[in-house]
Amino acid sequence: MQHGIKTPLTCYSREKEGGIIGITKKKIHEFINDLPEETDIDEVIYRFYLLQKLETAEKDIKENRLVSHEESIRESLKWFR
C-alpha cells in the first residue's frame, strides 16, 4: 500500500524518538470514528503511525526543538563527502 507521503528533510527533531506517545480514550474513539466503514489492519496501523508522527512534530514545534533548513542542508552535505 503506497500513500505518497514523504517525510520532509527539515522536520527532524533534535531529540531522539522515545517510545509511544500517550493517547486518550477520547482520541482513540475519534480516530476510529474517522476510519472508513471498511478498512484493513495495514491502513489502521499506518494511520496510528501518522498520528504519532504528527503529534510528535507538533510537540517539537511547541518546545522549539527544530532544525533549520540551512542546518539540515549542512548536515546532509556531510553524508556525501
Image (cartoon, rainbow, N blue to C red):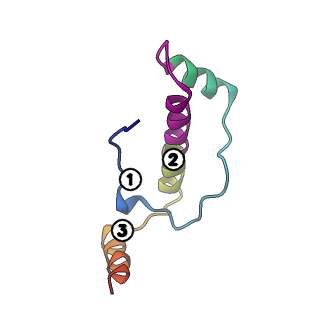
Tell me whether circle 2 and circle 3 mark residues in contact (CB < 8 Å): no
Secondary element type, mark 1:
loop
Q: Where is residue 78 in the image (x, y as percent from the top left)?
A: 36, 83
The residue indicated by pointer 3 is 68
Q: Is residue 28 above or below residue 52?
A: above
Q: What residue type is labelled 2?
A: Lys
- Find out whether residue 37 is within the magenta segment: yes
Q: Which of 69 and 77 is in front in this view?
A: 77
Report whether 7 appears left or right of 53.
Answer: left
Q: Is residue 56 above or below residue 49?
A: below
> Residue at point 54% right, 41% down?
49
The residue indicated by pointer 1 is 7
The residue indicated by pointer 2 is 53
Name the quadrant of the N terminus.
Answer: top left
Q: Nearer the viewer, residue 17 or 58?
A: 17
> Residue at point 49% right, 48% down?
58
